[in-house]
RNA sequence: GCCCCCAUCGUCUAGUGGCCUAGGACGUGGCCCUCUCAAGGCCAAAACCGGGAUUCGAAUUCCCGUGGGGGCACCA
């Protein structure tokens, strides 16, 4: 059996983290077991469709590196891969269920309760919300009555006829055996009055027709899966392997929501996270390799991923750990790769310096690409700072000593012929020894004068090399003036 | 309300009856390294939700609680 998995997003918005994780796991399962990964667009809700989000799906998958084998723009013989283009297929299948009695026409108006139910406010009336559809009066309509209504042009939906008694059991690869009493299931709508199928119907028809072997989706579908099983049975189709995935939630247990400010995949990329780091991180949300490895490339994941190692409990999304993984991925980059990425975050004025050398200093210190601008800010201009910054106990440094050092060091630097890190360090080390200073006592004032900030990528000599002789001496001179002004 | 699912350090997790005085990672604290800051190295604090049962022996099995999440749409 060739494994076939699918990612079936609806184009209703951005690519949120939970969706991406589902896509990732479906992709990994297909790759790991030598199968096919299919993209299917579930655009059966005409009201909620957001045209731009289709582009977001494509770009999101591309950014994450999740290449699909079949999809709307990549025919694999099971198309079309967009549900709105498969309407006649759903209609024909619904007809078939009508004939066998597994479904029936319902002429009821849309429930008035819908209006209240969808309100985010107070749950005014909790009782009876799900009643109308379950004990649907239209189940009892005679053929004659149905015909009359059809002829009268009354709109109708097609509903699934759920058995009144008994229970439905299914097997999930993650959650095990699950049984639900049929009375808990409602006569769900299969085909809407606008002729479009509901997700509940389309996913079953398409998953079967597209040969999906492993149905991978969020855990929120667990309780409606029995209804899908009943559908498969009504058609006489084999039941696919179900793989329900645990949810990704926030620290307070609620689910991730764009409206509440939780970042989408694209947002995270804009926040300075590498797509491969995000992928690495979410792979670890609800799955673990079984050993201590935590850093993975997508290619490595396709080698070690296993459905058997998927967890049941929902996982909390933590930016802290993602940030660490991001830092690790950044450090794993070649210096050229990092430089290419970092350059985009350097302010324009930085080009007067050797930005490649700056990148060399930055790589090990960058956790998020967006941190870069403020970290290199001082190169273009020393910010206003207080002379207290020259006070540094660990370096045995005070403003007074700093003034002394800066003055003494100026001629040495001035006469230095080779302006590079090693020469600078050598000369200053010599100076420190000659005057009985700790090396830090010499370096701290210089670093401070050159940057005006308490922490810099690289030390005094590294900064001096990049700044160049003229600028270095100018900044030291400015430091001297500042100190003299305050101390005298 | 009814139904389903889940439950190990703050967080992600390892753990499938004895290897557990519960392992790793992030984060936190300390130390080392060190021309600042990082990175790196070392160390530390930190968890089996509660109660029963099964067993010679339970984090691991079962039951009951409790807590959390999900579902109950002509949304997916």
Image: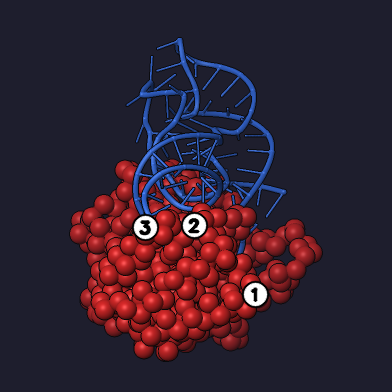
Chain colours: A red, B blue
> What chain does badge 3 belong to?
A
Q: Residue at position x 57%, y 72% from top? A: A258
> What chain does badge 2 belong to?
A
Q: Is residue A126 found left or right of B4 in the rendered image?
A: right
Q: Nearer the viewer, residue B70 or A134?
A: B70
Q: Residue at position x 26%, y 52% from top? A: A304
Q: Could one spot residue A325 in this view of the protein?
A: no
- Say if labels 1 and 3 share a chain: yes
The residue wearing badge 2 is A395
Residue A83 higher or lower than A30, as above or below: below
Q: Nearer the viewer, residue B7 or A164?
A: B7
Residue A388 in the image, given as x and y percentages of width and height: 61, 67
Q: Is label 3 or label 2 in front?
A: 3
Residue A228 in the image, given as x and y percentages of width and height: 45, 59
Q: Quadrant of residue A7?
A: bottom left
Residue density around tag 1, few if under 14, some if 14–19, many if 20 or more, within 10 Å: few
Q: Quadrant of residue A25?
A: bottom left
* Quadrant (top left, top right, bottom left, bottom right) of the N terminus of chain A: bottom left
Residue A176 in the image, given as x and y percentages of width and height: 42, 43
* Quadrant (top left, top right, bottom left, bottom right) of the C terminus of chain A: bottom right
Disc 3 secondary structure class: helix
Disc 2 secondary structure class: helix
Q: Earlier in the sequence, mark 1 or mark 3?
A: 3
- Looking at the rendered structure, which numbered label has been put on residue A370? none
The residue wearing badge 3 is A433
């Amino acid at each position: 059996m060739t494994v076939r998995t699918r990612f079936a997003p609806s184009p209703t918005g951005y690519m949120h983290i939970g969706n991406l994780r589902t896509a990732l796991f479906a992709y990994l399962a297909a790759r790991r077991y030598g199968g096919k990964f299919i993209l299917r667009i579930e655009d059966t809700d005409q009201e909620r469709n957001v045209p731009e989000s289709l582009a977001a799906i494509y770009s999101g998958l591309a950014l994450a590196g999740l290449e699909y084998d079949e999809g709307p723009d990549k025919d694999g013989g099971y198309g079309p891969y967009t549900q709105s283009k498969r309407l006649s297929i759903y209609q024909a299948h619904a007809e078939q269920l009508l004939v066998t009695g597994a479904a029936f026409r319902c002429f009821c108006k849309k429930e008035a309760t819908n209006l209240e139910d969808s309100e985010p406010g107070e749950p005014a009336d909790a009782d009876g919300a799900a009643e109308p559809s379950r004990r649907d009066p239209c189940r009892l309509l005679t053929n004659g009555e149905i015909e009359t209504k059809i002829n009268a042009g009354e709109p109708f939906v097609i509903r699934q006829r759920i058995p009144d008694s008994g229970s439905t059991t299914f097997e999930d690869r993650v959650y095990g055996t699950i049984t639900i009493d049929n009375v808990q299931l409602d006569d769900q709508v299969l085909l809407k009055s606008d002729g479009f199928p509901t997700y509940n119907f389309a996913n079953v028809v398409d998953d079967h027709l597209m040969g999906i072997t492993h149905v991978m989706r969020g855990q929120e579908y667990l309780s409606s899966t029995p209804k899908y099983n009943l559908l498969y049975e009504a058609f006489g189709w084999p039941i696919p392997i179900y793989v329900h995935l645990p949810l990704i939630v926030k620290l307070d247990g609620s689910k991730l929501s764009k409206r509440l400010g939780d970042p989408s995949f694209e947002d995270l990329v804009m926040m300075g996270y590498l797509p491969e780091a995000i992928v690495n991180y979410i792979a670890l949300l609800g799955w673990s390799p079984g050993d201590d490895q935590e850093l993975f490339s997508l290619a490595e994941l396709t080698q070690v991923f296993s459905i058997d190692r998927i967890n049941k409990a929902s996982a909390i999304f933590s930016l802290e750990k993602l940030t660490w993984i991001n830092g690790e991925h950044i450090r794993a980059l070649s210096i050229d790769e990092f430089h290419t990425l970092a350059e985009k975050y350097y302010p324009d004025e930085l080009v007067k310096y050797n930005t490649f050398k700056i990148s060399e200093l930055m790589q090990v210190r960058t956790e998020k690409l967006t941190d870069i601008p403020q970290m290199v800010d001082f190169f273009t201009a020393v910010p206003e700072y207080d002379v207290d910054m020259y006070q540094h106990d660990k370096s045995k440094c005070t403003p007074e000593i700093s003034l002394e050092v800066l003055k003494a060091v100026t001629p040495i630097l001035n006469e230095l012929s080779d302006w590079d890190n090693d020469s600078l360090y050598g000369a200053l080390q010599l100076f420190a020894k000659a005057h009985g200073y700790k090396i830090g006592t010499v370096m701290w004032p210089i670093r401070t004068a050159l940057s005006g900030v308490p922490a810099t990528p690289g030390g005094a000599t590294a900064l001096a090399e990049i700044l160049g002789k003229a600028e270095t001496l100018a900044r030291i001179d400015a430091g001297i003036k500042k100190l003299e002004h305050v101390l005298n």
